[in-house]
Image (spheres, rainbow, N blue to C red):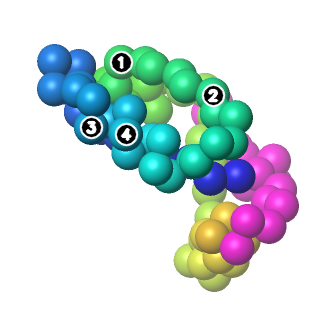
């Protein structure tokens, strides 16, 4: 599955965006979803307030990242911890 992600201000959208989407996907059926982008501060606060987190050794993280990059299935659950 191909994905395009654009990070831009809404008032900067013009016909070039639509043309680039059409050029990339051709005549394939697509789904368009638009959402407000979270700021870095919002993401940090959301992660800080979360009851769960993920913990990896450096070797586990390398393996995890390689699986994601190779589009292999990853077992997230075994790395998940809960804050007490």
Image position of 46 with respect to 74: above or below: above
Identify the residue at image location x=27%, y=37%: 16
Identify the residue at image location x=23%, y=19%: 10
The image shows residue 25 at horizontal and vertical percentages of 57, 48
Task: Name the foreground residue: 44 vs 20.
Answer: 20
Residue under numbered circle 4 = 19
Q: CA distance from mark 1 to mark 2?
A: 17 Å
Q: Which mark is residue 31?
A: 2
Identify the residue at image location x=34%, y=25%: 37
Image side of residue 12 versus residue 2, left or right: left
Q: CA distance from mark 3 to mark 2?
A: 18 Å
Quadrant of the frame with the C terminus: top right
Q: Which mark is residue 16?
A: 3
Range drawn in magenta: 70-84
Q: Which mark is residue 69?
A: none
Disc 3 packing (10 Å; few <14; some 14–19; many ≥20): few
The residue furthest front is 27
Query: Mark 1 or mark 2: which comes first in sequence?
Result: 2
Question: Taking the image as drawn, is residue 24 in sight?
Answer: yes
Image position of 25 with respect to 44: above or below: below
Are the two marked residues, 3 and 4, in contact with CB atoms closer than 8 angstroms?
Answer: yes
Q: CA distance from mark 2 to mark 4?
A: 15 Å
Image position of 13 with respect to 26: above or below: above
Disc 4 packing (10 Å; few <14; some 14–19; many ≥20): few
* Secondary structure, magenta segment, majority class: loop
Residue under numbered circle 1 = 36
């Amino acid at each position: 599955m191909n994905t395009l992600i654009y990070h831009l201000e809404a008032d900067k959208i013009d016909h070039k965006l639509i043309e680039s989407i059409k050029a990339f996907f051709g005549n394939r059926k697509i789904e368009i979803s638009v959402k407000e982008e979270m700021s870095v501060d919002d993401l940090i606060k959301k992660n800080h307030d979360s009851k769960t987190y993920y913990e990896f050794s450096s070797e586990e993280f390398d393996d995890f990242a390689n699986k994601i990059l190779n589009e292999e299935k990853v077992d997230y659950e075994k790395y998940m911890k809960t804050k007490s």
